Amino acid sequence: MQSNNTLDGTNTTVDGADTPTPDSRPQKTAAKSDLRSLSSEQILDLVTSLGQPKFRAKQIEEWIWSKGATSFDQMSNLPKTLREELSKQVILAGAEQVVRQVSEDGSRKYLLRYPDGTSVECVGMPNGNKLSVCASTQAGCAMGCAFCATGASGLTRSLSASEIYEQVMHVRDDFDTRVTSVVLMGQGEPFMNYDATLTAMRRLNSPDGAGIGARHITVSTCGVIPMIKRFASEPEQFTLAVSLHSAVQKTRDALMPGVRKYSLIHLYDIMGEYVDKTGRRPTYEYALIKGVNDSDNELGALRDFCRGTLCHVNIIQLNEIEGSKFHPTSPARAQEFVNSLNSVGVEATIRLSRGSDIDAACGQLFQKRNAR
């Protein structure tokens, strides 16, 4: 918003033209910050600048991180005058639910739109008294994996820590139950948005946030080696998953061009360092694609890559994507992969496919919505 008036309401004319005085030049009003984007220190500074006691900052953080408040009016234990002042200083702009799909197995997929128009997907997957959430770290993705619906749309932008966190809270509120685990395996490459992703993970883990155990928070990467090395030095017991999809360099390069510069040899070495440093078992994600990475040669390479290392292999049934040239391998072949890996001492299981009757694959819902 701009102001076209001088402080005294007058204009000065020079050479017959109306020229505003320096004080009357249009001034841009600074955009309000989103309250969720502020750090604890910044919220404390805001509260004290409004003449309020410091404990109000803790109450505000509880409302936005634990209770998921979407308006200042909901913050019922804050004085009305403080709520009014907050609304003048900051905004509380939440994501809008654009689409909600419900699967026969109880899974729910959402397309959320942030105030700037950016849309992302997240999924809630109930299992008994547990609720797992798959969240996105970027809108779109620049990695270009050949079989991924998200990669087809390219990268729009990275998400902030609060935008990542908000997805989990949206699912929690829709199910009206506590989230017990989170996997950052939705849209985007988390390690290309490292700082925001880690901040979101820490907030999900914090007792002042979602209170989810660190070992129940998993981040998945295509194999960005420098960030894996950095992640190994973080103090939390977060879980790491690596999208492998082939242990044959030529095949992996074709499927995952975004990490072509990181060879399998270097990936093998850095994962060994990760295990040595953390003592934690990483997971390798392997989506079986008919006629591409399901041959005996591919199986042998996968066994060699994993044999003698601490790891778990998740064999994934590829989701069918309309118009894609890639198709899933049979369940029988998937079981053969598991049996073969188990026979050489590699822990492997077939990951249960959820939401197969809805737009389950990352990016499918976004693409369908934008194709209309």
Image (cartoon, grey):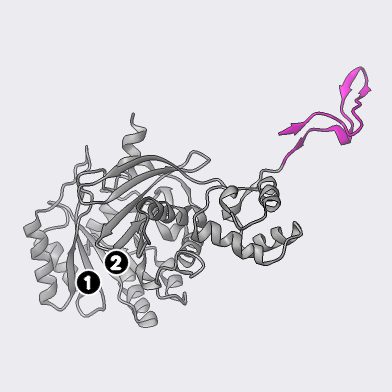
Say whether residue 362 is visible.
Answer: no
Residue 360, x across and y down, in percent: 26, 47
User: Who is closer to the viewer here, 172 or 290?
Assistant: 172
Q: Is residue 30 above or below residue 24?
A: below
Counting from the top left corner in percent of width and height, residue 123 is at: 33, 51
Instruction: Give the answer, above or below, for where 236 lies relative to 197.
Output: below
C-alpha span from label 1 to label 2: 9 Å
Please tell me in which quadrant of the rendered image residue 3 appears: top right
| 219 relative to 206 in the view: left or right | left
Q: Residue at x 22, y 73 (%)?
A: 306
Q: Residues within 10 Å of mark 1 (few under 14, many from 20)?
A: some
* Residue 259, label in figure: none
Which residues, given as a range, are shown in magenta?
Answer: 1-29
At horizontal 53% and vertical 48% (from top left) the residue drawn is 70
Which residue was labeled with disc 1? 305
Tell me: 297 left or right of 308.
left
Counting from the top left corner in percent of width and height, residue 14 is at: 93, 23
Is residue 130 in view?
A: yes
Is residue 199 toward the left or the right of residue 276 in the image? right
Residue nearest the observer in this picture, 73 or 367: 73
